[in-house]
Image: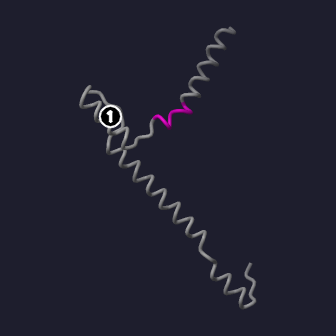
Amino acid sequence: MLKKLIVLLSGVYVLAAQADLKPDVLECDAKRATRNAAMEATLGVSGGCDMGKATENAMDDARDNVGDHLDDAKDNLPNLERDHDKRRGLDRD
């Protein structure tokens, strides 16, 4: 019984370690797509990453970066309405 429990727990530990590494392994970028294309040309075997997936990932990353920069710019804008109200002696808060 104890041996079965040890085997089961070690299997769970291995699966947890793989789940932690999976996003890094599955990330598809231009370097991996190029490597897979070269492997396909020479060996006839390639991975799941191709230029289409790498392009989609790059576009998603670019959209995220633009959104982040836009949010940062909005956060850095002065609150003109509040400044105007303070000069007039109004308190809207």
Q: Is residue 44 left or right of residue 16?
A: left
Q: Quadrant of residue 34?
A: top left
Residue 46 horizontal/vertical position (percent): 31, 31
Secondary-structure class at tag 1? helix
Residue 51 horizontal/vertical position (percent): 32, 43
Q: Is residue 11 left or right of residue 26?
A: right
Magenta region: which residues? 19-25
Tell me what residue is drawn at x 55 percent, y 31 percent: 19
Task: Pick out the residue farthest to the bottom.
Answer: 88
Main secondary-structure element of the magenta-colored stretch = helix
Tell me what residue is drawn at x 34 percent, y 39 percent: 33
* Residue highlighted by disc 1: 36
Tell me what residue is drawn at x 53 percent, y 32 percent: 21
Q: Which residue type does callout 1 highlight?
A: Asn
- Tell me the crowding category of disc 1: few under 14, some 14 to 19, or many 20 or more residues within 10 angstroms, Cα based: many
Residue 6 horizontal/vertical position (percent): 66, 14
